[in-house]
Image (cartoon, helix red, strand yellow):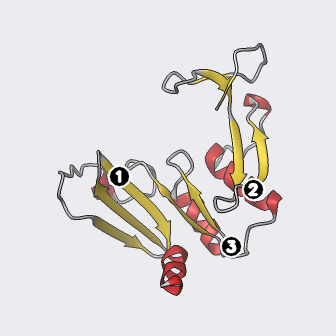
Amino acid sequence: MVSFRGCVFFRQYIPTKRHRFGMKNFVLTDTSTNYTYLWDVYTGGAFLFDREVGIGHSVVEKLMGKAGLLGKGHVVYTDNFYTSAALFMPLYASNTGACGTVRANRRGMPTQLRDMKMKPGDTPIFFTNPPLLTASFRDAGTVTVLCTGMIISIQRNFR
């Protein structure tokens, strides 16, 4: 979100953000070099996305496809707005790894996560549904992470 109070039709209002008014941007960057591959401005109804899978899924696949990064062994890191099993499965099928925090009640997540109340000091809990791995642990709150098996095999090769 880029803070903006001017008058444009695609200005967003998100009450939970520090800058409540602004323009929503989707950015694909390389974390090691800070190189920005693509930058897309969300324009509301004029923004083209597949309503069947949702805006988060469409944006990630669209940016990765436009940048030519799908199928080349790259790894995508996302936050809980984008992370879902429905997105990670096609990415895995196209030889692209993915990892990110996820909401425990997201569709496709193990049902045991929804009612789980972790206390400080509890051991992490893992669920596998190949090629997906879900880990839940306690930090300041309960954190749930979803990743594909490609991440695990890549990390083993670097040790």
Say few, some or many: other residues with alpha carbon within 10 Å of mark 1 (under 14 / 14 to 19 / 20 or more). some
Q: Is residue 119 left or right of residue 109?
A: left
**Point 65% across, 48% down: residue:** 52
Instruction: Give the distance between the C-alpha atoms of the residues marked 3 and 2, in whole angstroms.
Output: 23 Å
Q: Is residue 128 left or right of residue 97?
A: left
The residue labelled by disc 1 is 143
Q: Is residue 73 visible?
A: yes
Check the image and report above or below for 42 versus 63.
above
Residue 102: x, y in percent?
45, 52
Identify the mark nearer the N-term, 1 or 2.
2
Q: Secondary structure at mark 3?
A: loop
Residue 143: x, y in percent?
35, 52
Residue 119: x, y in percent?
17, 51
Res 150 quadrant in image: bottom right
Q: Secondary structure at mark 1?
A: strand
Q: Amino acid at mark 2?
A: Tyr
Identify the mark nearer the N-term, 3 or 1.
3
The residue labelled by disc 3 is 94
